[in-house]
Amino acid sequence: MDAQSLAARLKTSGLLRSQGLIGGKWVDAYDGKTVKVHNPATGEVITEVPCMGSRETKDAISSANDAFQSWSKVTAAERSRHLRKWYDLLISHKEELGQLITLEQGKPLKEAIGEVGYGASFIEFFSEEAKRVYGDIIPAPLADRRLFVLKQPVGVVGAITPWNFPLAMITRKVGPALACGCTVVIKPSELTPLTALAAAELSLQAGIPPGAVNVVMGKASDIGDSLLESSQVRKITFTGSTAVGKKLMAGAAATVKKLSLELGGNAPCIVFDDADVDVAVKGTLAAKFRNSGQTCVCANRVIVQEGIYERFATAFSKAVQNLQVGDGFSEGITQGPLINEAALHKVESFVEDAISKGAKILLGGRRHSLGRTFYEPTVMGDVKSDMLISREEVFGPVAPLLRFRTEEEAIHMANDTNAGLAAYIFTSNVQRTWRVTEALEYGLVGVNEGIVSTEVAPFGGVKQSGLGREGSKYGIDEYLELKYVCLGNMEH
Ligand code: NAP
């Protein structure tokens, strides 16, 4: 089935929505303006969605604030049941949601359906955690007192998300927020709003009350500013670029909001001489080429020890050569298009910069013959730490190989960046594993493994990769305030 007929079918099923959601009602932009949503594989317009701004955002905040008054008082067991129902609906619509992700984001259908499973897992996990938001009783220092700690929902949450995981970046925030009694205003990327809208539709079907989940999209800075300015919004949770994250951090100061930031990475992937080459190739391939290199945890620098460098480079290039590039709906495709022209130009400019400074193309290195935003899976050798491709996220299917001699040098190269999200090491030495993982200034470390994300483990970065953690038992703390209660005069 071609993409247009698929879109028509999704529309008939009610999952392809083209309006925002405010207070449980599907609405257009108040001035009627729209923005087109494109299929990155073909350039075709899938549909148009409202181009909203501050007026719609203020109404969404107000609806979320109204809904908060009741949702925060519903029992944890009831919130848990609603979230579980939402999870069940996400899973029973796995195929359609996967198709929507491939349509608007481009990743291969199998990977897109994988994202639905991953994204839904946060709703399932936090439906369970909803019932475990325990407080504390503290032994009092004075006999006539009793001391307690209550955990209470922070309030209305503004959730701003990127295009590379149109579902999972939303559920990772909305799951814990709803679980503990918060309500949300979601602003998905204007490039991929459709999955967010479909997930919101399923939240209504799950019985999550109108106003608890709102979705606005359009003018990013107007929406962002309205969320920042509002004193009703008590928390901003953001996943996206470091540059926008810094703006939001500065903007949140005016109303002293709680803030979680999941920002850009520059992941090192260190392959030591003592690594198993097959394990290192498989892990690096997964860490680098997932979503065509467009993830924040993608290996950005493959740092290889000199004794294994040639063997690794040959085996890795051979594995990369087998990757199949094409439209994510075609059978056997593992690499979809880049999200847009700007992303392609960025990749091209990074590759040109590296070549001009002495790097060698071992494989690929050009636009793909399919045209548009398809780029050849690429391996570059003799890359140095001062090249643009080592300094910044390439966010595309290019693996730069850098050489090192000693463990100290590898650690220094790995930490020589402002980012600190994910790092990977490949080694069969247990002592080295401990030494190096402790020395890496990163929030996540994969050892002999290239895919580490899971709903049960804390996800987040250090340094300029962000603040706070998502997923796991720690993720819910980001949406809670501690209230200390001192009960005095107990002897009367
Ligand atoms: P982006 O340009 O920062 O956009 C992220 C979101 O912020 C989008 O919804 C965007 O809206 C919105 N936005 C842009 N300007 C804004 C403003 N002034 N105020 C409020 N919102 C604003 O990032 P991206 O290009 O979509 O995503 C790629 C980046 O995200 C990469 O750096 C990647 O590493 C990072 N990322 C990090 C994680 C993590 O967990 N650490 C996960 C995934 C991605 P529009 O799209 O509508 O303009």
Image: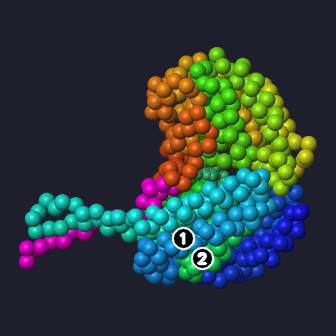
Placement of 380 over or under 393, stated as above or below: above
Placement of 164 over or under 276, stated as above or below: below
**Residue 213 location (% of width, % of height):** 58, 74
The answer to which of 409 and 3 lies nearer the viewer is 3
Element assignment for label 1: helix
Disc 1 residue type? Leu
- The 10 Å Cα crowd at callout 1, few under 14, some 14 to 19, many 20 or more, is many
The answer to which of 15 and 34 lies nearer the viewer is 15
Q: Are marks 2 and 1 in contact (CB under 8 Å)?
A: yes
Q: Residue at x 49, y 50 (%)?
A: 458
The answer to which of 46 and 456 lies nearer the viewer is 456
Tag of residue 83: 1
Q: Quadrant of the C terminus?
A: bottom left
Residue behind mark 2: 206
Q: Residue at x 74, y 63 (%)?
A: 95
On whether residue 20 falls in the magenta region, the answer is no
**Residue 187 location (% of width, % of height):** 63, 67
Please state the extent of the stretch shown in magenta in the rendering.
Answer: 471-492
Task: Name which of mark 2 and mark 1 comes first in the sequence.
Answer: 1
**Residue 26 location (% of width, % of height):** 68, 81
The quarter of the picture where residue 397 lies is: top right
Ligand 1 within 8 Å of the CB at mark 1: no
The extreme left residue here reads 491
Color style of the picture = rainbow
Tag of residue 25: none
Element assignment for label 2: loop
Disc 2 residue type? Ala
The quarter of the picture where residue 119 lies is: bottom right
